[in-house]
Image (tube, rainbow, N blue to C red):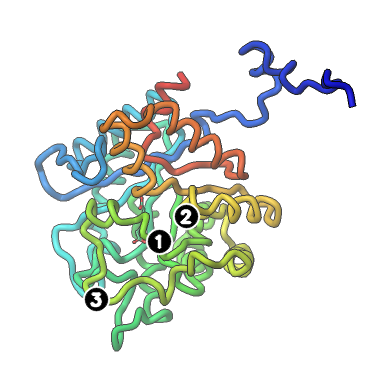
Amino acid sequence: MSIRPYFRPRRLRNSEEIRRMVRETQLSVDDLIYPLFVTHEMTSKAAIASMPGQYQLSVEALVAEVGEAQRLGIPAVILFGLPKEKDALGSDSYNDGGIIQQAVQAIKETVSGITVMTDVCFCEYTDHGHCGVVKDNYVDNDATLELLAKQAVSHATAGADMVAPSGMIDGMVAAIREGLDDAGFERLPILSYAVKYASAFYGPFRDAVDSSPQFGDRRTHQMDPANAVEAIREATLDVEEGADMLMVKPALSYLDVIRIMKERFDLPLAAYNVSGEYSMVKAAAQNGWIDEKAVALEILTSIKRAGADLILTYHAKDVAQWLG
Ligand code: PBG
């Protein structure tokens, strides 16, 4: 073999122009879904200590934030609510005067040109912090289904454009689809958190919405981080039940699962770059240990390269500006 290589991949890295021409993955503002927290409190913006740059927003501050996201070209937001009162059933979540319902109505009165998604789950609304009705220290699957449908219909009635069930309750997509259709919302899409792991990366989020389970954990419904084949089964069921889009969550430790989903299913695929992934980048950047912009863009590009079409990320506004 000659000491002079015949093939030189470096030729296609000669300049930024050439690198741009052969670049395989493009991150775009169109890929972004921006998660936001809305609270019944009147204080306009309360910083979330464990998620630098993220806030619990009053309804008014939320409307302003959604307007800003829209101006930046972000196509969608997803809302999480902090209710005034938590109770055993999480009734604020399906109450027509609940925090999410108020928030969606207020956005719809003021801002257009941005899709409003709502997270459909109970953990932010129950006093025990679990994702549904609890019986004998266990999340009762079928008792939860009926309330999930009720919650989704209530969000839709308030004006939500899409609902995203996140509880990993068996049959949740079918129950919500049926509830929506019965209420005349057959055009409303469902983004299912089809493959959601019992992950420690949700820690900062649970601080943000005060949704840590008061006893036990979520391992009887969320998936075991060690499993990938099971993800195919979970997603297959959600497709059969009528999901319009699928999600893998978290993203960074599950890039292999994102790739499997992309190869096996023909629905648009979202990945959730969750709170712990975000806060690690923020903390390291604040210490001067990494370059925040470069690392965030590299992470999001890797999630897209793995196969995600859409990314839920707290970096959304920054990314829109960096790419803009
Ligand atoms: C459940 C829900 C969770 C997240 C989104 N929806 C928390 C959980 O399952 O405990 C986590 C999001 C994040 O960590 O950024 N409503």
The residue that appears at 26% across and 61% down in the rendered structure is: 124
The residue that appears at 44% across and 68% down in the rendered structure is: 222
Could you say which is closer to the camera, residue 262 or residue 173?
A: 262
- For ligand 1, tell me if the residue under mark 2 lies within 8 Å: yes
Q: Amino acid at mark 1?
A: Ser
The image quarter in which residue 51 lies = top left
6 versus 153 height, above or below: above
Could you say which is closer to the camera, residue 143 or residue 269?
A: 269
Q: Quadrant of ligand 1?
A: bottom left
Check disc 1: other Cα within 10 Å, few if <14, some if 14-19, many if 20+: some
Along the polypeptide, which appears first: circle 3 or circle 2?
Answer: 3
- For ligand 1, tell me if the residue under mark 1 lies within 8 Å: yes
Residue picked out by circle 2 = 249
x and y, in percent, of residue 268 in the image: 61, 47
231 versus 275 height, above or below: below
Along the polypeptide, which appears first: circle 3 or circle 1?
Answer: 1
Left or right: 266 with respect to 301? right
The image quarter in which residue 286 lies = top left
Residue picked out by circle 1 = 199
x and y, in percent, of residue 193 in the image: 48, 58
Along the polypeptide, which appears first: circle 2 or circle 1?
Answer: 1
